[in-house]
Image (cartoon, helix red, strand yellow):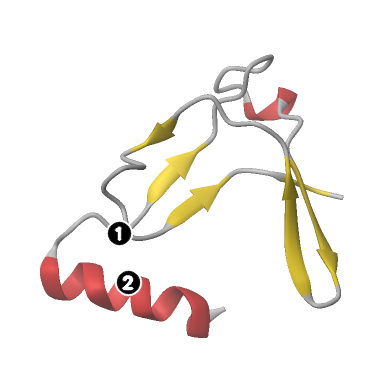
Amino acid sequence: SEAQTGPVRSEYQRTGRLAFALAVSEPDAGSDTMSMATTVRSSDGKLVLDGVKTFVNNGEYAPALLVAAIDD
């Protein structure tokens, strides 16, 4: 939603700094998103991630994290 993405986008436009880290690769899938096993589901109004990522691009520097996952 705009409420969630707006502040990240605005900060990037204002500063030009890294907006988020990207978590895609997995132990048995590499960067093949069609073979991903990480899932996301809703529980009591919250998102629950379940899975393992092997590499997070710029994870140590980014203020936010974008995780690729399959919606159960």
> What is the number of the mark on residue 51?
none
Q: Circles 1 and 2: CB distance less than 8 Å? A: yes
Q: Is residue 46 left or right of residue 6?
A: right
- Percent across and percent down for residue 67 are 56, 47
Q: Which residue ends up furthest to the bottom in the rendered image?
A: 3
Q: Residue at x 46, y 53 (%)?
A: 65
Q: Compared to 12, does 60 lie above or below?
A: above
Write down the residue under mark 1.
19
Q: Residue at x 50, y 52 (%)?
A: 66
> What is the number of the mark on residue 9?
2
Q: CA distance from mark 1 to mark 2?
A: 7 Å
Q: Earlier in the sequence, mark 1 or mark 2?
A: 2
Q: Amino acid at mark 2?
A: Arg
Q: Amino acid at mark 1?
A: Ala
Kindly state the secondary structure of the residue where label 2 is placed: helix
Q: Residue at x 24, y 74 (%)?
A: 11
Kindly state the secondary structure of the residue where label 1 is placed: loop
Q: Is residue 17 left or right of residue 70?
A: left
Dot 2 surroundings within 10 Å: few (below 14), some, or many (20 or more)? some
Dot 1 surroundings within 10 Å: few (below 14), some, or many (20 or more)? many
